[in-house]
Image: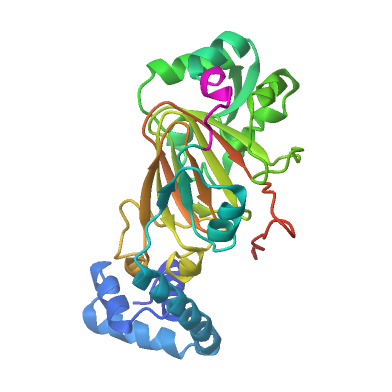
């Protein structure tokens, strides 16, 4: 019996990633394929011209990245938590070193710590109509195909549902809703006080993004094409972070998204993820998590949450960007 197209593609992809053939055969057996047939299908896929041609070059790239991952593991580095970090130290030790860090005092003294609390937003901007993402729980593709989830409501009604609706992934104001581009919410920008040398003093279009949602909002494992300063204003969020150089272990098939759940990975479907180094960190009010360009991250809100992200960093030579293919 021939494998289905999806199993066939999975098998070829894992062979190109360097996953051991015996592990692939075991996964096929677990999926209902007879043991002898599973071994035969692995051997057949290995002989396919596309796999044979791509394997050599792909193996070289994966080998180089594996060396970088091994060095990362030997360093035994965790995501540091720091206070009092200057812009110069941040750029030298984290931005250019391609290392995440939590700066615990980043938002100290910013008016938004009081003015962006949900009750303050409802009081000052409650009549503003905002676009949000709704009905996310009914769509497994809400991250990759968000347009079907767009809806408009009063900000006060949205915030009321967050406070009283309990944990859910169904309702979320995300970066894709461009709330801070709305004229009615421009007053929020006066509550920012970024230290010199971290972000450009003059905001660039689309570089500043607002996230507001209940406990339970979830963003699947993905990477950004720019470095991100993720600022937590209200509530807490849990992050799972995987280094950019471990991309071959993340089964990235669609743009910047991975199908792996970093919190509970299915190692039968994604066996190579077992070798990935996953860093877990909780970011609380007043803290900023620096996510280097290309670092994979998955996010879960632990409370009703208000977050702000900067994606235009003030660094010499401009921001390093990830160029995606496909």
Q: Nearer the viewer, residue 51 or 176?
A: 176
Q: Residue at coordinates 36% horizontally, 88% vertically from top-left?
A: 43
Residue 121, located in which quarter of the rendered image? top right
When the figure is inspected, residue 2 is found, relative to residue 300, above or below; the finding is below
When the figure is inspected, residue 239 is found, relative to residue 61, above or below; the finding is above
* Horizontal arrangement in the rendering, residue 269 relative to residue 10 (left or right): left
Q: Residue at coordinates 43% horizontally, 44% vertically from top-left?
A: 299
Can the viewer see residue 57?
yes
Can the viewer see residue 33?
no
In the image, residue 64 lies at what x, y percent?
50, 81
Q: Nearer the viewer, residue 306 or 179?
A: 306
Any magenta on residue 268?
no
When the figure is inspected, residue 175 is found, relative to residue 256, above or below; the finding is above
Is the stretch drawn in magenta largely helix, strand or loop? loop
In the image, residue 37 lies at what x, y percent?
28, 82
Q: Which residues are magenta?
A: 106-116
In the image, residue 175 lies at what x, y percent?
60, 37
Q: Residue at coordinates 46% horizontally, 65% vertically from top-left?
A: 251
When the figure is inspected, residue 44 is found, relative to residue 132, above or below; the finding is below
In the image, residue 68 lies at what x, y percent?
46, 75
Q: Nearer the viewer, residue 141 or 300?
A: 300
Any magenta on residue 113?
yes
């Amino acid at each position: 019996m021939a494998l289905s197209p999806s199993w066939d593609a999975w098998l070829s992809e894992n062979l190109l990633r360097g996953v051991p053939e015996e592990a692939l055969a075991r996964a096929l057996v677990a999926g209902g394929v007879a043991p002898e047939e599973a071994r035969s299908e692995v051997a057949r896929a290995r002989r396919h011209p596309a796999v044979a041609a791509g394997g050599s070059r792909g193996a070289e790239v994966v080998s180089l990245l594996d060396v970088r991952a091994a060095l990362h593991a030997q360093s035994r580095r965790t995501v540091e938590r720091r206070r009092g970090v200057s812009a110069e130290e941040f750029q030298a030790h984290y931005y250019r070193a391609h290392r995440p860090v939590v700066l615990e005092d980043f938002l100290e003294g910013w008016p938004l710590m009081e003015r962006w609390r949900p009750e303050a937003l409802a009081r000052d901007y409650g009549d503003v109509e905002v676009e949000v993402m709704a009905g996310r729980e009914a769509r497994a593709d809400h991250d990759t195909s968000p347009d079907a989830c767009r809806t408009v409501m009063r900000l006060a009604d949205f915030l009321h549902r967050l406070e009283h609706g309990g944990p859910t992934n169904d309702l979320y104001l995300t970066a894709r809703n461009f709330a801070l581009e709305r004229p009615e919410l421009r007053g929020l920008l006066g509550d920012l006080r970024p230290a010199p040398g971290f972000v450009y003093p003059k905001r660039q279009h689309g570089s500043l993004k607002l996230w507001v949602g209940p406990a339970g909002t979830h963003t699947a494992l993905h990477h950004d094409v720019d470095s991100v300063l993720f600022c937590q204003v209200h509530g807490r969020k849990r992050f799972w972070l995987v280094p950019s150089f471990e991309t071959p272990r993340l089964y990235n098939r669609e743009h910047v998204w991975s199908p792996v759940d970093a919190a509970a990975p299915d190692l039968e479907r994604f066996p190579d993820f077992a070798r990935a180094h996953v860093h877990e960190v909780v970011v609380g009010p007043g803290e900023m998590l620096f996510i280097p360009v290309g670092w994979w991250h998955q996010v879960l809100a632990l409370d009703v949450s208000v977050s702000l992200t900067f994606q235009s960093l003030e660094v010499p030579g401009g921001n390093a960007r990830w160029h995606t293919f496909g």
